[in-house]
Image (tube, rainbow, N blue to C red):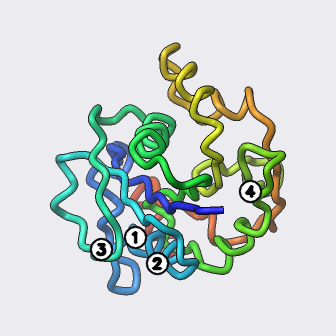
Amino acid sequence: MKTAGIVLAGGRSSRYGRPKMFELYNGRPFYTYSVQALAENQLDPLLISTNSFLASRFDAPEAELVIEQEVHHGPLYAIHHVMSEYKEPEWFFVLSADIPFVTAPFVQQLLLHRHPDVKAIIPVQGDKLQPLLALYHRSCLPVMDTALRENKRSLMALLDHIKFKKIPFDQHNPCFRNINTEDDFKQFM
């Protein structure tokens, strides 16, 4: 089962005030933690989905940049764009770029659940779905097409129409901590 890794790094970071994926945690930009977690699991290709405004700021030689044709259209658009460009992978492991606590063992744990009977593997923390740290099967593409044509940008527009497997995680698992504001950054650092 060929599986690609995608780091979603094209957002506005409007609540943060500047591109948060480049903030440093332990001397490294946030996005590099997602790249590393995917790379350590030998996902191929390894991709950073971003826009032309941010592209020059990435320094991850192990990953290819995928430049979104339309800027700031959300994660559903970004995943759809990558799936449309890369025809070989059967599965796509998606991580956001603002989760500096994500780990390779977390990625490995989700990879174990790939199965032909499901179209996505979504971690759940408590009762909250975490669709930005998840696996999506190529067969999701037609449902994504429909959602995007209807101007729906949320990943829930996809999940509401496919069979997916929930993988429970402890409420306090740090992998899911994303940084949305500078106060978040101060609290977790």
Q: Amino acid at mark 4?
A: Pro
Residue shown at the point (48%, 69%) measured from the top left? 34
Q: Which residue is mark 3?
A: 60
| Disc nearer the start of the sequence (3/4) | 3
Q: Which residue is mark 1?
A: 30
Q: Which residue is mark 4?
A: 123
Work out which quarter of the rendered image holds the N terminus and state it: bottom right
| Disc nearer the start of the sequence (3/2) | 2
Q: What's the distance in space between the residues labelled 1 and 2, CA to CA?
A: 11 Å
Q: What's the distance in space between the residues labelled 3 and 1, CA to CA?
A: 12 Å
Q: Label 1 neighbourhood size at 10 Å, few (<14), some (14-19), many (20+)?
A: many
| Disc nearer the start of the sequence (1/2) | 1
| Disc nearer the start of the sequence (2/4) | 2
Please indicate whether residue 4 sits to the left or right of residue 160 in the image.
Answer: left
Q: Which residue is mark 2?
A: 36
Q: Amino acid at mark 3?
A: Ala
Q: What's the distance in space between the residues labelled 3 and 2, CA to CA?
A: 9 Å
Q: Secondary structure at mark 3?
A: loop
Please indicate whether residue 188 sits to the left or right of residue 113 in the image.
Answer: left
Q: What's the distance in space between the residues labelled 4 and 1, CA to CA?
A: 21 Å
Q: What's the distance in space between the residues labelled 3 and 4, CA to CA?
A: 26 Å
Q: What's the distance in space between the residues labelled 2 and 4, CA to CA?
A: 19 Å
Foreground disc of the pair 4, 1: 4
Cβ atoms under marks 3 and 4 closer than 8 Å: no
Q: Secondary structure at mark 2?
A: helix
